[in-house]
Image (cartoon, helix red, strand yellow):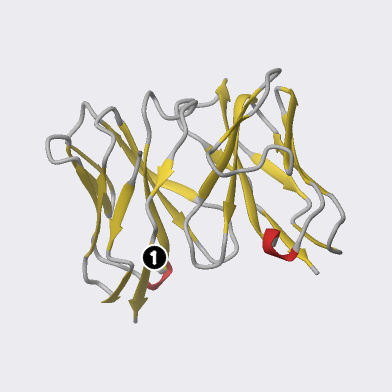
Amino acid sequence: GENVEQHPSTLSVQEGDSAVIKCTYSDSASNYFPWYKQELGKRPQLIIDIRSNVGEKKDQRIAVTLNKTAKHFSLHITETQPEDSAVYFCAASRGTGGYNKLIFGAGTRLAVHP
Amino acid sequence: GAVVSQHPSWVICKSGTSVKIECRSLDFQATTMFWYRQFPKQSLMLMATSNEGSKATYEQGVEKDKFLINHASLTLSTLTVTSAHPEDSSFYICSAAGEGVAGADTQYFGPGTRLTVL
């Protein structure tokens, strides 16, 4: 069935360092890949997404790369700050994403130490 | 834009009672809504997909008679946990997608409802 694997489960970095989170998906029909940030007890917030016709997308300190052949995509956060500390989830979806169910990875707990 | 609300934000109930959770899209028409359940330190698990005016589609392993979903309008979906038991205690989150929203091909999440069953 559909599955998204996410690594690592926890990540600890010093402020200013970069953080990389990787995900692998199983459904070759997936073509929409969002990343969500969730703080404790709060809703997931979309931070960046990428569609299958694009290999890389960047938004300030955040970037996502996609390798459709290998079926994996990654989140890159540069110049990390303490407020980046949260749980990050990757997800994959068929279609354009909004009307199709999202399959979530298990999450990565990122801790940025001052 | 693209604001989704949930009510209540938290609820405590006795075992055996039913609890209704509302999910509303405040500034757009949500043709599709999703219900997720999230246990502590775990990921979001999709329970069901709800399209306005039709029956919900439940994920494998989710009891449709226990988790009743109604999507009667383009701005409101409800999840009723019937005969709740302590193992139903969880964080329930809805998301919505629809027209009239910038980037309509993505989902917007509600703030979640924390259910505790005693």
Percent of width and height locating residue A12: 30, 76
**Which residue shows up at 44% across the image and 38% down it?**
A102
**Which residue is rendered at x = 82% and y = 52% of the image?**
B83
The quarter in which the N terminus of chain B is drawn is: top right
Residue extending furthest left? A69
The subunit letter for the residue under badge 1 reads A
Q: Which of A103 and B74 is in front in this view?
A: A103
Residue B66 figure quarter: top right
> At which x and y percent is residue B111?
64, 51
Picture quarter with the C terminus of chain B = bottom right
Q: Going by the image, does B91 lie left or right of A20?
A: right
* Mark 1 residue type: Asp
Residue at the image position 78 percent from the left and 64 percent from the top? B117
Q: Mark 1 points at which residue?
A: A84
Is residue B1 at least partly visible in the picture? Answer: no
Question: SS for tag 1?
Answer: helix
Q: Which residue is at the front of the view, B106 or B87?
A: B87
Say left or right for B70 vs B102: right
